[in-house]
Image: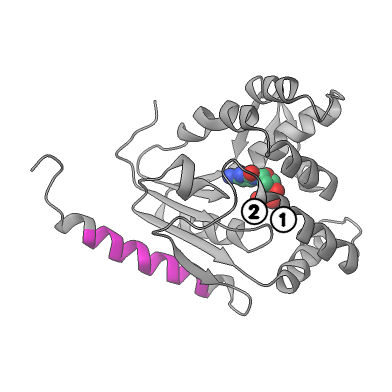
C-alpha cells in the first residue's frame, strides 16, 4: 500500500536535463526511495518492441503496460528476470517510450504502479508529470531545465560511456523532436507545476544542483512543520 504520509520530492524536466542524476543523489542523501518513471515508459516500450506490438494500437500498448513484469534493484532494472538496464537506455527505446507516452490508456495503466513507490521514509520521483499529475500534493516540486545543446552534450557523453555510438547532430535533432512531443501532447504534457522551483542546470554541476534541492527540501519541511495539522 502506498503511504500517503511519506514525503515526496518531485523532479521533472526534459530528457537529459540531469534529473536522473540529481534525483538519484537526492534520494541517496535523504535515504529515500527513488522512482525513475521514465524507466517504466522505457520498459513498456521495450516489451512492446520485443512483442512487435503495433505502435498505433493504444489498447495493445496499455495491455503491455498493465502486464509489465518488472523490478528495480539498486541501479538495475529487470524485465521479467532479465537485466535490461542498458537496453532501455538505447535511443530507439527512448523514442518509442516518448511515442507510447502520448496515449492516455498507457499513462493510466502506469498510474497505480507509480503511486506504489511512495513508501516511508519518503520518495524522490523523477519524470515529466510527477508534480503535475502523479504527486500533485508533494511538499517539494522541482523542474530542471537546461539548453538543448547542453542536454545533447550530456546525452552524447552518457551514450559513449555506455559503449553506444552517437552523433551530436542526430542527438540534437532527436532531443528537439522528443521535447516537442513531450511538451505538446494533450495529456500530462511536460510543463512545470505552478508551485515548482525552476533550476537551470546548463552550467551547473550535479553536486550544486543536489545541494540546491536539499536546501529547498529542508525549507519545505520547516514550512510544513509550522502549519497547523489538517482539520484545525
Ligand atoms: O526520462 P526518460 O528520457 O527516461 O523518459 C522516456 C520517455 O518517457 C520520455 O520521452 C517521455 C516519457 N515519460 C513520460 O511521458 N512521463 C514520465 N513521467 C516519464 C517519462
**Looking at the rendered structure, which numbered label has been put on residue 183?**
2
Q: Position of residue 36 (x, y in %)?
A: 59, 45
Q: Depth check: give the residue in front, 62 or 220.
A: 62
Residue positioned 48% across, 68% down in the render: 198
Q: Give the secondary structure at mark 1.
A: helix
**Magenta region includes residue 220:** yes
Farthest residue toward the bottom? 203
The answer to whether residue 59 is left or right of residue 172 is left
Q: Which residues are magenta?
A: 208-223
Q: Quadrant of the N terminus?
A: top left
State yes or no: Cβ of the residue under disc 2 lies below 8 Å from any atom of ligand 1: no
Residue positioned 42% across, 56% down in the render: 141
User: Looking at the rendering, which quadrant does residue 60 occupy?
Assistant: top right
Q: Position of residue 43 (x, y in %)?
A: 71, 35
Q: Position of residue 131 (x, y in %)?
A: 46, 49
**Magenta region includes residue 30:** no
User: Looking at the rendering, which quadrant does residue 217 occupy?
Assistant: bottom left
The answer to whether residue 68 is left or right of residue 153 is left
Q: Give the secondary structure at mark 2.
A: helix
Do we see residue 14 in this rendering? yes
The residue that label 1 is drawn on is 180
Q: Please name the predominant secondary structure of the magenta segment in the image.
A: helix
Mark 1–mark 2 Cα distance, whole angstroms, equals 5 Å
Q: Depth check: give the residue in front, 57 or 153.
A: 57
Reply above or below: 150 against 59: below
Crowd around label 1: few <14 · some 14–19 · many ≥20 (10 Å): some
Whether label 1 touches label 2, CB < 8 Å: yes
Do we see residue 83 in this rendering? no
Amino acid at each position: 500500500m502506498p503511504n500517503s504520509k511519506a514525503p515526496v520530492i518531485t523532479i521533472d524536466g526534459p530528457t537529459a536535463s540531469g534529473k536522473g542524476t540529481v534525483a538519484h543523489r537526492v534520494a541517496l542523501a535523504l535515504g529515500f526511495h527513488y522512482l525513475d518513471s521514465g524507466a517504466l515508459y522505457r520498459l513498456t516500450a521495450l516489451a512492446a518492441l520485443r512483442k512487435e506490438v503495433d505502435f498505433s494500437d493504444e489498447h495493445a500498448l496499455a495491455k503491455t503496460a498493465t502486464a509489465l513484469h518488472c523490478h528495480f534493484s539498486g541501479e538495475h532494472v529487470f524485465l521479467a528476470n532479465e537485466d535490461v538496464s542498458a537496453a532501455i537506455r538505447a535511443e530507439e527505446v527512448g523514442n518509442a517510450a516518448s511515442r507510447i507516452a502520448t496515449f492516455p490508456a498507457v499513462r493510466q495503466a502506469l498510474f497505480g504502479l507509480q503511486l506504489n513507490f511512495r513508501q516511508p521514509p519518503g520518495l524522490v520521483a523523477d519524470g515529466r508529470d510527477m508534480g503535475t499529475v502523479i504527486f500533485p500534493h508533494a511538499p517539494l516540486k522541482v523542474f530542471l531545465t537546461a539548453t538543448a545543446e547542453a542536454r545533447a552534450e550530456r546525452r552524447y557523453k552518457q551514450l559513449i560511456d555506455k559503449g553506444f555510438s552517437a552523433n551530436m547532430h542526430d542527438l540534437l535533432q532527436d532531443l528537439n523532436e522528443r521535447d516537442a512531443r513531450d511538451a505538446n501532447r494533450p495529456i500530462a504534457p511536460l510543463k512545470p507545476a505552478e508551485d515548482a522551483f525552476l533550476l537551470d542546470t546548463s552550467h551547473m554541476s550535479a553536486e550544486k544542483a543536489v545541494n540546491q534541492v536539499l536546501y529547498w527540501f529542508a525549507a519545505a519541511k520547516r514550512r510544513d512543520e509550522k502549519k497547523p495539522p489538517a482539520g484545525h
